[in-house]
Image (cartoon, grey):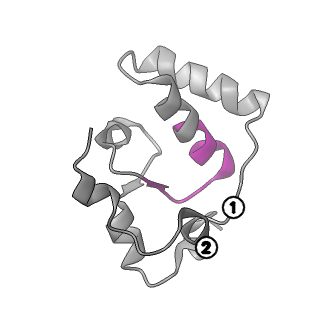
């Protein structure tokens, strides 16, 4: 569990930082399963989040969880790092 000081650093509500809601489709579930098959220590929730990032072509995932660091095609940014970009989160969304 991460320290409380790291959890409560954002002055903005999560929906302000991440306004896009992405559906979990069969394609996403299949990709998550394949990620878990290749990465035996990857938790189901992490695999699902990584699969959404990959299937949507997002530039990065915003998380304190270092488990994403070893996944090919996934760039992890910590919440404080995203916040420092001055509200560019919506533009961080999908890669061109």
The structure residue drawn at horizontal position 52% and vertical position 39%, both measured from the top left corner, is 50
Q: Name the secondary structure under disc 2.
A: helix
Q: In screen coordinates, is 94 left or right of 43?
A: right
Where residue 45 is drawn, which disc sits there?
Answer: none
Residue 57, position as x, y percentages in the image:
63, 53
Quadrant of residue 90 within the rendered picture: bottom right
Q: Quadrant of the N terminus?
A: top left
- As measured in the structure, the alpha-carbon distance from the residue carrying label 1 to the one carrying label 2 is 8 Å
- Image side of residue 32 versus residue 56, left or right: left
Residue designated by label 1: 20
Where 38 sits versus 82, above or below? above
Mark 1: few, some, or many residues within 10 Å (few <14, many ≥20)? few
The residue lying toward the viewer, choosing from 79 and 68, is 79
* Residue 13: % across, % down: 53, 68
Q: Which mark is residue 90?
A: 2
51 w.r.t. 79: above or below: above
How far from the left and from the top, in percent, is residue 94?
Answer: 64, 63
Q: Residue furthest bottom?
A: 86
Residue at x 66% of width, y 66% of height: 19
Range of magenta residues: 50-62
Up/down of 44 relative to 71, above or below: above
- Relative placement, left or right, of 89 versus 31 is left
Q: Tell me whether circle 1 and circle 2 mark residues in contact (CB < 8 Å).
A: yes
């Amino acid at each position: 569990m991460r320290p409380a000081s790291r959890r409560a650093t954002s002055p903005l509500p999560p929906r302000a930082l991440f306004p896009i809601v992405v559906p979990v489709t069969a394609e996403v579930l299949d990709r998550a399963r394949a990620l878990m098959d290749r990465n035996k220590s990857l938790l189901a929730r992490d695999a699902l989040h990584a699969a959404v990032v990959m299937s949507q072509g997002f530039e990065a995932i915003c998380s304190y969880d270092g488990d994403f660091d070893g996944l090919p095609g996934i760039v992890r940014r910590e919440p404080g790092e995203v916040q420092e970009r001055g509200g560019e989160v919506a533009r961080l969304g999908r890669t061109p």
